[in-house]
Amino acid sequence: MFASRQESPSDYVVLPSGREQLVERYPNAVIQGHRDFSPDLNQDGEITSDEFIKQCPCFDAKREYLHLP
């Protein structure tokens, strides 16, 4: 089974305000997707798609949401 994007246009309206609230509460937090918490199975310093525990999100959340204030 392959992961697919599930967000709706309204999600993009809510994301900035939701992120803003989280930044206020957790100023040192870093945006990550579930897949970013997968272990580096081959210990090469990079978590690649064959090492993902979960395929979601099916995009790089850090890069995708970098533009959010």
Image (cartoon, grey):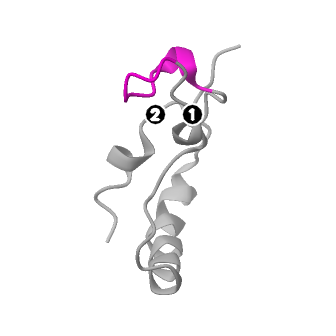
- Residue 7 location, x and y as percent? 58, 45
Is the Cβ of the residue at disc 2 closer than 8 Å to that at disc 1? yes
Residue 46's image quarter? top left
Q: Is residue 48 magenta?
A: yes
Q: Is residue 13 magenta?
A: no
Residue at 51% over, 28% down: 40
Residue 48's image quarter? top left
Residue 43's image quarter? top left
Q: Nearer the viewer, residue 11 or 67?
A: 67
Q: How many other residues sit within 10 Å of disc 2, few (<14), some (14-19) or many (≥20)?
A: some
Q: Nearer the viewer, residue 20 or 28?
A: 28
**Residues rendered magenta in the picture:** 42-52
Q: Is residue 28 above or below residue 46?
A: below
Query: CA separation, marks 2 and 1?
Result: 8 Å
Instruction: Kindly state the secondary structure of the residue where label 2 is placed.
Output: loop
Q: How many other residues sit within 10 Å of disc 1, few (<14), some (14-19) or many (≥20)?
A: few
Give me the disc on residue 59.
2
Residue at 38% over, 54% down: 65
The residue pinned by badge 1 equals 5
Earlier along the polypeptide chain: callout 2 or callout 1? 1
Q: Residue furthest left?
A: 67
- Residue 62 location, x and y as percent? 38, 48
Report the quarter where the N terminus lies: top right
Q: Residue furthest bottom?
A: 24
Position of residue 56 in the picture relative to residue 48 (left or right): right
Q: Nearer the viewer, residue 69 or 30?
A: 30
Q: Is residue 57 above or below residue 1?
A: below
Q: Nearer the viewer, residue 18 or 29?
A: 29
Position of residue 28 in the picture relative to residue 36 (left or right): left
Instruction: Kindly state the secondary structure of the residue where label 1 is placed.
Output: loop
